[in-house]
C-alpha cells in the first residue's frame, strides 16, 4: 500500500499534535511537529534578547537564523520525537506561556518561515509522514493526499491549554491563557506571509465536543478511505 502525506492544520490548542502523534504511531509514519520548530526559534530569540515583550529585533533574528540548528530525535519511552536546538533537548522549555506569547510574532517573519518550510518539505519527500501546524496543507504540502483542518471555540481551547499548564505546575490564570489564544488566532490568521487558512480541499473537524477516542476513530476512517483510494 502506498504511503501518503497527512497534513493537519488549525488553530492553537485544538489537539493537532496529539492527533498527529496518534496517527503516526498507528500507521508507523514519521511525525513532525512543525509548531515545535517555530517555538524553538522563539525560545532562541527570547534567550538571546532578540525579542523583549512584543518588541522584535527583526534584523537580528534574520541574521541569527544561520546559527539555529533544529532536529528531532525519537524518544522511545515517550513514543514520539522531541526537538533539539543546537544539540540540546528543549521540548519542555518551548511549552511555556512565555514562548506561547511570542511564537506568533516570530512565525510572521518571512525569512523564518522560508527556512523552516524548506526543512519541513525535505522531511516529507519520502511521504509516510504526519505533520501538523498552520500552513502544512496550504504551503508545506499543498499536494498532501489527506488534509485536515482542526477547530474549536476559543474558550474550550483555552481551557484545554490552561488545564495542561496547571498540570505541569505552571502558575497561570485562565484569563491570561484565553487572551493568549485569542491573540494568536488573530496574528496567525492575519499575517502577511502564509496566514492560517483552511485549504480548499481540507476536511474541517470541529472537536469542541468530541472526545479524543471519538475524534481519532472518525479521522482514522478518513485515513483508511484515503489509503484505499491509492491502492
Image (cartoon, rainbow, N blue to C red):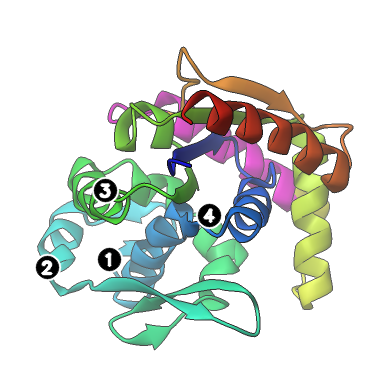
Are circles 2 and 1 on residues that touch, CB within 8 Å? Answer: no
Number of residues whose C-alpha sits closer than 10 Å to that of mark 2, classed few (under 14), some (14–19) or many (20 or more)? few
- Distance from Cα at disc 3 to Cα at disc 1: 33 Å
Does residue 183 belong to the magenta stretch? yes
In terms of secondary structure, where does tag 4 sit? loop
> Mark 2 = which residue?
66
> Mark 1 = which residue?
50
Of 153 and 213, which appears nearest the observer? Answer: 213
Judge from the rendering whether residue 63 lies leftward or rightward of residue 56; answer left or right.
left
- Distance from Cα at disc 1 to Cα at disc 4: 14 Å
Identity of the residue drawn at 64% across and 42% down: 181
Foreground label between 4 and 3: 3
In terms of secondary structure, where does tag 3 sit? loop
Magenta extent: 176-195
Residue 220, quarter of the rendered image: top right
Q: Return the x and y of residue 37 as percentages of the image width and height.
A: 39, 60
Tell me if residue 160 can be seen: yes
Judge from the rendering whether residue 149 lies leftward or rightward of residue 206; answer left or right.
left
Number of residues whose C-alpha sits closer than 10 Å to that of mark 3, classed few (under 14), some (14–19) or many (20 or more)? few
- Distance from Cα at disc 2 to Cα at disc 4: 24 Å
Number of residues whose C-alpha sits closer than 10 Å to that of mark 4, classed few (under 14), some (14–19) or many (20 or more)? some
> Mark 4 = which residue?
101
Of 69 and 75, which appears nearest the observer? Answer: 75
Foreground label between 3 and 1: 3
Identity of the residue drawn at 80% across and 39% down: 217
Mark 3 or mark 1, earlier in chain: 1
Amino acid at each position: 500500500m502506498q504511503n501518503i502525506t497527512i497534513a493537519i492544520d488549525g488553530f492553537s490548542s485544538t489537539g493537532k499534535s496529539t492527533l498527529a502523534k496518534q496517527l503516526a504511531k498507528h500507521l508507523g509514519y514519521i511525525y513532525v511537529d512543525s509548531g515545535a520548530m517555530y517555538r524553538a526559534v522563539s525560545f532562541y530569540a527570547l534567550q538571546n534578547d532578540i525579542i523583549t515583550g512584543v518588541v522584535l529585533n527583526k534584523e537580528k533574528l534574520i541574521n541569527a537564523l544561520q546559527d539555529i540548528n533544529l532536529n528531532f530525535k525519537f524518544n522511545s519511552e515517550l513514543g514520539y520525537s522531541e526537538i533539539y536546538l543546537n544539540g540540546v533537548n528543549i521540548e519542555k522549555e518551548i511549552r511555556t506561556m512565555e514562548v506561547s506569547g511570542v511564537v506568533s510574532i516570530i512565525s510572521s517573519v518571512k525569512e523564518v518561515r522560508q527556512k523552516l518550510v524548506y526543512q519541513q518539505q525535505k522531511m516529507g519527500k519520502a511521504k509516510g509522514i504526519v505533520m501538523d501546524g498552520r500552513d502544512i496543507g496550504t504551503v508545506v504540502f499543498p499536494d498532501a493526499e489527506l488534509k485536515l483542518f482542526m477547530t474549536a471555540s476559543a474558550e474550550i481551547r483555552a481551557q484545554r491549554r490552561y488545564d495542561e499548564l496547571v498540570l505541569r505546575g505552571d502558575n497561570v490564570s485562565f484569563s491570561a491563557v484565553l487572551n493568549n489564544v485569542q491573540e494568536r488566532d488573530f496574528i496567525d490568521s492575519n499575517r502577511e506571509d502564509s496566514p492560517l487558512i483552511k485549504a480548499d480541499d481540507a476536511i474541517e473537524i470541529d472537536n469542541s465536543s468530541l472526545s479524543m477516542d471519538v475524534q481519532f476513530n472518525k479521522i482514522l476512517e478518513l485515513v483508511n478511505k484515503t489509503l484505499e483510494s491509492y491502492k
